[in-house]
Amino acid sequence: MLQEFFDGKELCKNINPDEAVAYGAAVMAAKLCGHTTTKMVKELMLLDVTPLSLGTELRGERMCVVIPRNTPIPTKMTKNIVTVKDNQPRLDIEVYQGKRTRSTDNFFLGSFTISGIPPAPKRSYLSVVEHCFEIDADGILTVTAKIVSTGKTKSLTVTNLSGRLSKYEIEKMVKDAEKFKLEDQEFKRKAEAYNA
């Protein structure tokens, strides 16, 4: 019946199903225990990685990458962002997945707003908002914004991160990033000058 499902293709029967299950369980146990540095575990493990970079939008539609492409998961990375206006009371956080410099050229995952930033001059240590991106072993992305001076937090959870884009769409986004590399570099230069 399984062979019929795969249009009559010859099935590989030399893999012992019990060994395959034991192998997978051993790798998962090693990952969960944090033993990913030993030579034996590295040889066994097939790592899940992020297919595209994950980040937030900065002023001027610039993508701020928090988790780079091909980062093994599970992972947790943070980046500090400061306000761009004096006495800015809130920060709108838009989350994107992709390789392009302009955030709107990437895939939009969601957004949220954190308010309660204390009145302070722009780029002040009082106005620092920590962006924490965490992807668990199931591929669930949690983005948390924390106002460092007050400790206030707000989060966004994106489930089924790996199932949102097809393999074809991911490959197309990677090819587009290569195709528009010079254009993206020019955009980045202008955006950095604008934000200086």
Image (cartoon, helix red, strand yellow):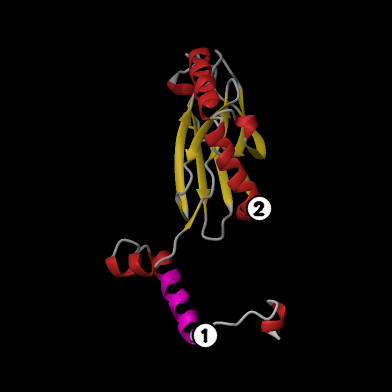
For the residue marked with disc 1, what is the amino acid? Pro
**SS at badge 2:** loop
Q: Amino acid at mark 2?
A: Ser
Q: Secondary structure at mark 1?
A: helix
Give the crowd class for mark 2: few <14, some 14-19, many >=20 residues within 10 Å: few
Residue 55 location, x and y as percent?
A: 54, 37
Residue at 54% over, 26% down: 184
| Residue 17 - label | 1
Q: Is residue 152 visible?
A: no
Question: In the image, what residue occupies the spot 54% across and 37% down?
Answer: 99
In what quadrant of the picture does the N terminus appear?
A: bottom right
Residue 136 at what x, y percent from top left?
52, 56
**What number is the disc on residue 166?**
2
Q: Quadrant of residue 40?
A: bottom left
Residue 131 magenta: no
Query: Up-down: is 119 above or below 52?
Result: above
173 or 88: which is nearer to us? 173
Dominant secondary structure (helix, strand or loop) of the stretch shown in magenta: helix
Residue at 62% across / 53% down in the picture? Answer: 167
* Circle count: 2
Question: Is 16 a magenta residue?
Answer: yes
What residue appears at the point 48 percent right and 80 percent down from the top-left corner? 20
Image height of 183 relative to 153, above or below: above
Question: Does any portion of residue 139 appear in the rendered image?
Answer: yes
